[in-house]
Amino acid sequence: MTAHAHHHNVRPEDWPEDPYVGKATAGKVGMWIFLLSDAMMFVGFLLAYGIRRGNSEVWGCTPELVEAGKCLVVEPSLGINFTAGLTFLLICSSVSMVMAYAAVVERNKKSAMLWLGLTIIGGALFLVGQYYEYFGIGHAGLIEKGLIFGESAYATTFYIITSFHGMHVLSGVIYLSIMWVRLSRGKYDDGDYNQIEMLGLFWHFVDLIWILVFTFIYLVP
Amino acid sequence: MLFVLTILEVGLVYLPLSKGLMLSGLVCMALVKAFLVAWFFMHLNHDAPPLGKGIFYSFIFAGIYAVVLISEGMWRGGYFWFFGG
């Protein structure tokens, strides 16, 4: 592996076979290690959410609970249908990422740029959706409706987990954009798809985490 | 498949099921979706088995940790909503 590691433009299939990681390049293994540590951060947040929710009698203050004297201020419920739309969007962007990767492997630069561009648009639209959910565009968002960070464990865990994921989407959109520029400049014309595969791993990870966040934060009754 | 499972998940929330049953269904579907993303999109199906195993086993420990800590939190709060109607 070391003999090839000094060359930046070695195609992944030319990478020497390793008994443990096979043909995976050093960059790919490094990305997996980063993603695992990142995943454990999400596990920590989701655990904190689960523990707080598990021992709370009130989770989301409804008008009925205020009337019963169990909490003071009404909190809005989370929009499941709208967020399901965001989930579809992120899954679509994962599919377009797969297509971009396949196009780079086939050395079809034009197609790769198109699919990677669509992935960027998908990620950017997700961020707009999250902004719309928090702050509202043309109508009140969750904050204006009374879901205030620090006011309840329900609100705080919601904002910490969804915004932490949102930061990953933002990082992903920036990462995708940088790679799109590099792709347009012909950096991967020689068939070295290793860096596009690493980018794909990060972007699919963002999708994978959202699948869990969507279920645990939005869907669990 | 991912689209279908997402539709099923959202549909499940509107069904008149007990919390325990609904939670089990939702968690199972979410884990299947997460597995599909990792297996196909993240190419674990093509990677060397030791790499995939190393990744998979990490989450088994995280899962055990989650079950133990959340159960303890529920017990401490005296509110075992998982089994509630």
Image (cartoon, helix red, strand yellow):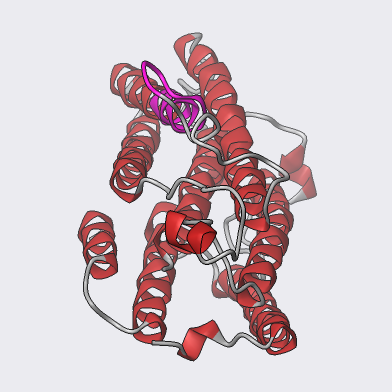
- Residue A84 x/y as whole percent: 31, 47
Residue at left 41%, top 68%? A221
Residue A142: x and y, percent? 49, 35
Residue A146 percent location from the top left of the image: 55, 38
**Quick check: A191 above or below A1?**
above
Can you see residue A10?
A: no
Which image quarter: residue A122? top left
**Residue A140 colored magenta?**
no
Give the residue displayed 56% in from the left and 70% down from the top. Answer: B52
Closer to the camera in the image, B29 or A49: A49
* Type of secondary structure dominating the magenta stretch: helix
Q: In the rendered structure, which segment of residues is drawn in magenta? A: A124-139
Task: Identify whether A64 is placed above or below A165.
Answer: below
Q: Is residue A125 magenta?
A: yes
In the rendered view, tell whether residue A76 sits above or below residue B34: above
Q: From the top left corner, tell me how far across and down residue A1 is, in percent.
A: 73, 51
Residue at position x 37%, y 64% in the image? B33
Quarter assignment of residue A148: top right
Give left or right: position of A102 versus A197: left
